[in-house]
Amino acid sequence: MKVSKVWEILRRFKELCKLRGWRTTESEDWVETGNEYHIFLWARGIHPSSFKSIATNRKCVVREGLSYRVVEASYMAWLFSESPPENLVNVFLENPEFSKKIALYDLSPFAEGKNACFKLNYTDSPVFKEFERFLENALGVRIEEYVNLKSII
């Protein structure tokens, strides 16, 4: 999946967020609801140790006029254009704190022309629930729960 396609999906979704009264910006991939920041990170792939470090720190840069400030993201969604490696998924599944605040979306089937993607979302983020509805209703994407094959063998 080309970066431009992920960017276009997020651009359209953020337009929808603005209609709901949620704050966002054109140049940054976060949505603010109340005092909570929901950030979107795109990745083709990432090493599990880097994922763990970013997921643990949950920092987000917010531009205010000509300056920036760092805030703690309440929720974090990872959008993968290639299937995340199994060891990364295991890092996610083995840490209960991650699953409360982080969602993983494997968009690789959609990138291959299929109208499907996989998710691991156990958060209570209204933004991520709305993102899933957006994928289904606006883009016709069928969202399936990610199945870790080793967990069912």
Image (cartoon, rainbow, N blue to C red):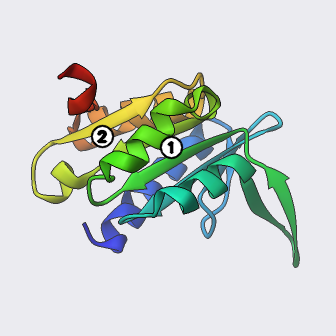
Considering every residue shown, the one lying at the far left of the view is 113
In the image, 128 versus 9, the foreground residue is 128
Q: Which residue is located at x 25 percent, y 66 percent?
A: 1
Crowding near the residue tagged with mark 1, few <14, some 14–19, many ≥20 C-alpha atoms within 10 Å: some
Above or below, 114 against 131 in this view is below
Identify the image quadrant of residue 68.
Answer: bottom right
Number of numbered discs visible in the structure rendering: 2
Q: Position of residue 97 (x, y in %)?
A: 65, 30
Locate the C terminus by quadrant: top left
In the image, 108 versus 20, the foreground residue is 108
Q: Position of residue 130 (x, y in %)?
A: 48, 31
* Tag shown at residue 16: 1
* Tag shown at residue 133: none
What residue is pinned by disc 2? 138
Q: For this view, does 40 lie left or right of residue 55?
A: left
Instruction: Look at the numbered disc 1 and give the secondary structure of its residue.
Output: helix
Q: Position of residue 47 (x, y in %)?
A: 46, 63
